[in-house]
Amino acid sequence: MPKLIRLYITQVIWGFVISAVFVGVLLAVNVANLRGLIWGSDVGLVALVMIWFMNGIVFAGVQFAYKIMSMAERPCGPRRGSPVVNVFKPVLAKQSSRAER
């Protein structure tokens, strides 16, 4: 299996694990009485799976994007150019009066 595909699969798995922890914390803290709504409904299990799955998609995407962007090469050397470029010299600016125009 190519390394990129293996990396994607592992990051998606981590994203869904993070989602499970996040949903568990949501239920433990009982945000907006979510625990009561889920356990008190006959379709609460479907709602729980949907919350976990939708958050899993988001967390998996963020996890994969973070991993890919952290693999970038670090720039070496100065990023702002040489210090000689930033030397400013005053320039005389002439302005004519309205009467001379």
Image: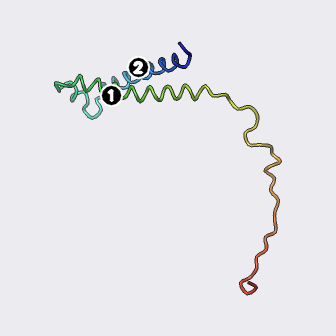
The vertical placement of 34 against 93, above or below, is above
Residue kind at label 2, given as amino acid type: Val
Quarter occupied by residue 19: top left
Q: What crowding class fits label 1: few (fewer than 14 Cα within 10 Å), some (14-19), or many (20 or more)?
A: some
Single out the residue that lies furthest toward the top: 1
Farthest residue, direction front: 1
Q: Is residue 25 left or right of residue 94?
A: left
Q: Residue at x 37, y 25 (%)?
A: 22
Mark 2 or mark 1, which has the lower sequence index? 2
Residue where numbered disc 1 is placed? 26
Is 93 above or below relative to 79? below
Q: Hey, which quadrant is residue 60 in on the image?
A: top left
Identify which residue is drawn at 43% across, 27% down.
59
Q: Give coordinates of residue 72: x percent, y percent.
A: 63, 28
Q: Quadrant of the C terminus?
A: bottom right
Quick one: 33 or 4, which is closer to the camera?
4
How far is mark 2 from mark 1, CA to CA? Answer: 14 Å
Badge 1 marks a residue whose secondary structure is helix
Tell me where residue 5 appears, x and y as whole percent.
51, 18
| Label 2 crowd bin: few (<14), some (14–19), many (20+), radius 10 Å | some
Rendered residue at 79%/74% (across/down):
94
Say left or right for 9 vs 44.
right
Q: Nearer the viewer, residue 58 or 28?
A: 58
Quadrant in which residue 33 is drawn: top left
Q: Dot 2 corresponds to which residue?
A: 17
> Of discs 2 and 1, which sits in the foreground?
2
**Amino acid type at mark 1:** Leu
The answer to whether residue 42 is left or right of residue 65 is left
Secondary structure of the residue carrying tag 2 is helix
